[in-house]
Amino acid sequence: MTEKFHLFLQLLKAVSFSVVVFYSSGCSDAPIDYRKEMEDRIKSDRQLGRDYAEKFEQQVVILNDIESTDYLRSLVRKLISHADDLSISDSAAGVYLIEDKSHTLRCFGFPGVRLYVSVGILKIIDYESALAALLAFELGRIQARHFVKNLEKIKPQELVQSLSNDAFFDYTSKEGSDPVKYAVKMMYDSGYDPRGLVSYLNLLQNNPMRTPLTSKTLKYLSEATFDEISSYPPLIRPLSKTDGFIKLKRKYFKN
């Protein structure tokens, strides 16, 4: 009996060892470092953004208005300080004013947070929340990686035309409304009334000849904005017109 029991123990040890070896061999690969993977992706996206921003700046006229760009940069910093995504939140934001071309209101955003704002927008925006919405929406597009995901549609020698094309971004796709979701959250957490995004989209709808976005796209984005805003309680004391915004309006409203 003792001999049989001894043989049983040896057999049990052998089986246990085999199980351990099998399990170890099956799990020998190191666990995926998702944070490093994300950091590598962000680094790659930012380099891409810098490369394309350099080409883009050769195709537009950038205005030398330090006071206005400092104000816009401070507004962007406030927004990105409340972003969840590292591709936005730890970026050193660059904001630039560009001249309108053919009276078209166009704003652009590149990974690494380089935003370009059409000066014509400043002439017709009446509320700071709408201006914050414009910037938050461009930040949302960067966070959603719209630019990176659509690189095959870009002609580097015609960046302005490519990025101004409504077909470049399919906002009516499943992920098309992601920038709206990100923008509303950034605005709300920063203290800006997210209804400013509705005002901004209405402004574009009321100037159909000056925006590259179609009425169908604007209608879809407006509906997505209303849906997203409905999930938030109203802000008790949203930010209104600051001194920076008032100075900006005085400067460009005259022109």
Image (cartoon, rainbow, N blue to C red):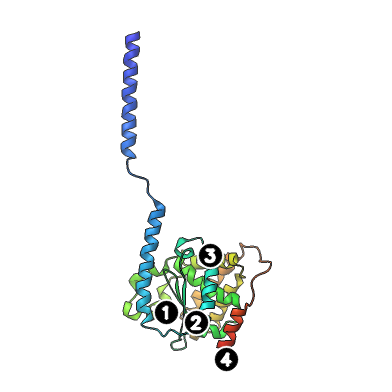
- Give the percent coordinates (x, y) of residue 103: 47, 88
Residue that badge 2 annotates: 66
Select label 4 or label 1 by which is in front: 4
Select label 3 or label 2 by which is in front: 2
Name which residue type carries label 2. Ile
Residue that badge 1 annotates: 164
Name which residue type carries label 3. Ser
Please tell me which residue lies in front, 123 or 93: 93
Residue that badge 3 annotates: 81
Residue name at image x 33 percent, y 30 percent: 19
Check disc 3 and report its element: helix, strand or loop.
Answer: loop
Tell whether 122 sits left or right of 116: right
Residue name at image x 31 percent, y 29 percent: 18
Q: Earlier in the sequence, mark 4 or mark 1?
A: 1
Q: Earlier in the sequence, mark 3 or mark 2?
A: 2
- Cα separation, mark 1 vs mark 2, equals 26 Å
Residue name at image x 64 percent, y 72 percent: 239
- Give the percent coordinates (x, y) of residue 95: 47, 76
Direction top: furthest residue:
1
Name which residue type carries label 4. Lys
Check disc 1 and report its element: helix, strand or loop.
Answer: helix
Numbered badge on residue 254? 4
Select label 3 or label 1 by which is in front: 3
- Cα separation, mark 4 vs mark 1, equals 27 Å
Structural crowding at the residue carrying mark 2, measured as other residues with C-alpha within 10 Å and reported as few (<14), some (14–19) or many (≥20): few
